[in-house]
Image: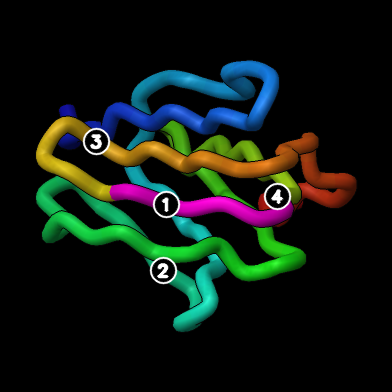
Amino acid sequence: MAKQLHVELVAVEKKVWTGEAEMVIARTTEGELGVLPGHAPLLGQLAEPGQVRITLGGGEQVAYDVAGGFVSVTAEGVTILAEEAVPATASATH
């Protein structure tokens, strides 16, 4: 089994998505960031408007449009703290 990341996507009012993933892609002010298990720790500011894509086991992908916030990568996993997060209107997998 491939290594997994523990991912939490949190908006101001609630936890939007949490679970295990193979990869996270987030658009930051510095460009698009791809995070795989073992990634070096970092803190980045999410771009506005932005999108976070979470690749699950088996290649399934979930995507959220986000506004404002930060992405944090630590040894424990990835945390996305967004002012707003809603399911993306168009899936990048289809």
| Residue 68 lies in the magenta-colored region | yes
Residue type (three-letter) at the residue carrying disc 2: Leu
| Residue 60 lies in the magenta-colored region | no
Q: Is residue 58 above or below residue 20?
A: below
- The disc placed on residue 47 is none
Which callout, 1 or 4, points at the residue further toward the start of the chain?
4
Q: Residues within 10 Å of mark 1 (few under 14, many from 20)?
A: many
Are the residues flagged by discs 2 and 4 in contact, CB closer than 8 Å?
Answer: no
Is label 4 in a helix, a strand or a loop?
Answer: strand
Q: Which residue is mark 4?
A: 66
Indicate the position of residue 47 as horizontal and vertical percent values. Answer: 62, 69
Residue type (three-letter) at the residue carrying disc 3: Gly
Q: Which residue is mark 1?
A: 71
- The disc placed on residue 77 is 3
- How far apart marks 3 and 4 lie (CA) works out to 19 Å
Is label 1 in a helix, a strand or a loop?
Answer: strand
Q: Which residue is mark 2?
A: 33
Which callout, 2 or 1, points at the residue further toward the start of the chain?
2
Q: Quadrant of the N terminus?
A: top left
Q: Residues within 10 Å of mark 3 (few under 14, many from 20)?
A: many
Indicate the position of residue 48 as horizontal and vertical percent values. Answer: 71, 67
In the orientation shown, which residue stands out farthest toward the right? Answer: 89
Q: Which region shows up in magenta?
A: 67-72
Residue at 56% over, 67% down: 27
Residue type (three-letter) at the residue carrying disc 1: Val
